[in-house]
Amino acid sequence: MNRTATTQLLQRVDRPAAPSALSNALVFGWRAILKFKHVPEQLFDLVMTPIMFTLLFTFVFGGALAGSPREYLQFFLPGILVQTVVFNSVYSGMGLSTDLGKGLFDRFRSLPIWSLAPFAGLMVGDILRHLIAGLIILTIGLILGYRPEAGIVGVVAAFVLLLAIGFGVGWIFMVLGLLIRTPMTVMTIGFTAIFPLVFASNIMVDPATMPGWLRAFVEVNPVSLMTTALRGLMSGDATAAQVGLALIAPVLLTAVLAPVTLWLYVRSER
């Protein structure tokens, strides 16, 4: 083929359309999923902690707190789902801190992509982690005797709420990941902040047994509100008010911290 024919052929080729924001986000989401393949120890960390919490509290404390492990499991399992999602959200900040430390985000900035695509990809990976851990815990609970009275509809509704909680809480650790370049420091600060909220809640025990001053805190603790709504959805007696209260914290966190995340990311470019 002569040069003229080659030039005419090249001139007829149109520039491909720029990828959409959704396409960018899905590509980075796939990158987050591939981490499970190449770093399988992340999956091990993801599932072992909630499994140990479920088994230990059910069999060690179940008889003392509810009369039998099976009875306690009806109360405890929805709470351990909330705890797992909150704890797993720390990995968002750790992953972001790791990527920043390796210079990956400097490479991402040079690409013609939606500026929030890397963060959207991390969120997709978070959703997958939450689903995997939640399904594993639910399966173990069913084997041990947990029975959601609302059936499959209640379980699906509970998991939708669970993912919304994980999405909102994840922004906290995105901000930490942008501010702190050491993943272990992100983990230390993250767990230090969320441990009081998780353990001073109604996840493990009924607040009615607590001292008055502690009970007052537990009843307004966002983690307690999330747990109450999740229990209600899985048992079939949740109210719109309970679900609304559970969503206040995730919605506020998203509304406040998503812009902060973008501002910190843009500022770091300078």
Image: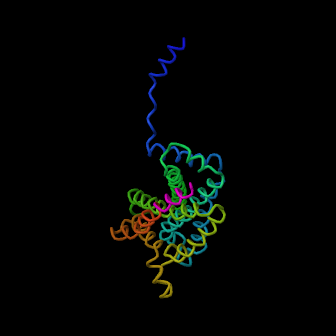
Picture coordinates of residue 160, whole percent (x, y): 42, 58
Asked if the stretch drawn in magenta spans residue 266, the answer is yes
What are the residue bounds of the magenta stretch? 259-270
Residue at (53, 60) in percent of width and height: 264
Give the quarter of the image for residue 63.
bottom right
Residue 93, visible in the rendered structure: yes
Q: What's the magenta bit mostly, secondary-structure-wise? A: helix
Q: Is residue 208 left or right of residue 186?
A: left
Q: Is residue 262 left or right of residue 245?
A: right
Residue 1, visible in the rendered structure: no
Using the image, determine if residue 249 lies above or below residue 111. below
Using the image, determine if residue 71 lies above or below residue 174. below
Residue at (47, 81) in percent of width and height: 217
Q: How is the image coloured?
A: rainbow
Q: Nearer the viewer, residue 180 or 243?
A: 180
| Residue extending farthest top | 2
Q: Nearer the viewer, residue 186 or 222?
A: 186
Using the image, determine if residue 85 lies above or below residue 201. above
Picture coordinates of residue 134, whole percent (x, y): 51, 58
Picture coordinates of residue 83, whole percent (x, y): 53, 67
Q: Nearer the viewer, residue 49 or 148?
A: 49
- Quarter of the figure with the N terminus: top right
Picture coordinates of residue 177, whole percent (x, y): 58, 61
- Quarter of the figure with the C terminus: bottom right
Residue at (50, 87) in percent of width and height: 211
| Residue extending farthest left | 240
| Residue extending farthest bottom | 212
